[in-house]
Amino acid sequence: MKRVLFFAYGLTCYLMFGAVYLYAIGFVGNIAVPRSIDSAVGTPWPAALMINLGLLAVFGLQHTIMARPTFKRLWTRIVPEPIERSTYVLFSNLAMILLFWQWRAIDAVVWDVQSGPARNALWALFAGGWLIIVVATLMLNHFDLFGLRQVWLHLRGRPYTRLTFAQPVFYRHVRHPLYVGWLTAFWVTPTMTAGHLLFAIGATAYILIAIQFEERNLLEAHGADYAEYRRRVPMLIPMPRRVSRAAATEAQRATA
């Protein structure tokens, strides 16, 4: 019975994330949601600034602290290990819902692209960012990332096995394509308000900090394999493939 309950809990958290993700698209893009980044409650800008920074801090701290292995080891003394990841997803959902609910609009316009083709191109890039996020998770193990694989294995009475280090398509060009998608979704917009800019800056700061912690953990988990991967592949911006000094020397000899 407990296995069934754990699976139901994990599935609920996963479906909840799906709803939150769809709302996030509408929230950031000001599309078809009751309260968006630019249509939320109006508040004098000093108060709005403090409230929004507090909401971003809650989101960032929750994601950063709960994702760390040290916290997980302590946390699983309270929360059963099969549902640890699902519980992380649940708290992430709640942090996002709090942000959607309490966000304060700051409607001063920073830029506003009126040209039809340029505006459409920006909307296409905005949509592309959200698509990259989904595809990047599918290239690794989408269901493990959101805790569903863990509760499914537990339901079937099978032990959890950690994922092996892999470099699927996007990951051969940048180490963090998931974050590339988030940054694109947050920054690319035809109309940028001060409130949206604050959100984008805060989210970017969180991402850049989170990457440092994440890479430290990946180095501990995968050792030399990840160290070599980090040497070869850029963090966020695709670059021409790096060639080792030995390979470059060999190529020069071959063409001499």
Image (cartoon, helix red, strand yellow):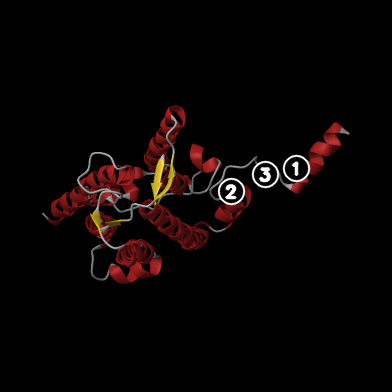
Give the label on residue 234, or none.
2
In the displayed image of the protein, which residue is found farthest to the right?
256
Residue 239: image location, x then y, percent: 62, 42
Corner quadrant of residue 95: bottom left
Image point (45%, 55%), residue name: 204
Instruction: Please state if 96 lies on the left or on the right of 168 as rendered.
Output: left
First in sequence, mark 1 or 2: give its number. Answer: 2
Whether tag 2 and tag 3 are in contact, CB under 8 A, the answer is no
User: Where does the C terminus fall, quadrant-wise?
Assistant: top right
Residue 170: image location, x then y, percent: 50, 39
Residue 52: image location, x then y, percent: 32, 62
Give the label on residue 247, or none.
1
First in sequence, mark 1 or 3: give its number. Answer: 3
Q: Residues within 10 Å of mark 1 (few under 14, many from 20)?
A: few
Q: Could you tell me if residue 86 is visible in this image?
A: no
The residues tagged by marks 1 and 3 sit, at their Cα atoms, a distance apart of 10 Å
Question: What amino acid type is highlighted by mark number 1?
Answer: Ala
Q: Residues within 10 Å of mark 2 (few under 14, many from 20)?
A: some
Vertical comparison of 172 with 159: above or below: above
Q: Secondary structure at mark 3?
A: loop
Question: What amino acid type is highlighted by mark number 3?
Answer: Arg
Q: Which residue is mark 3?
A: 242
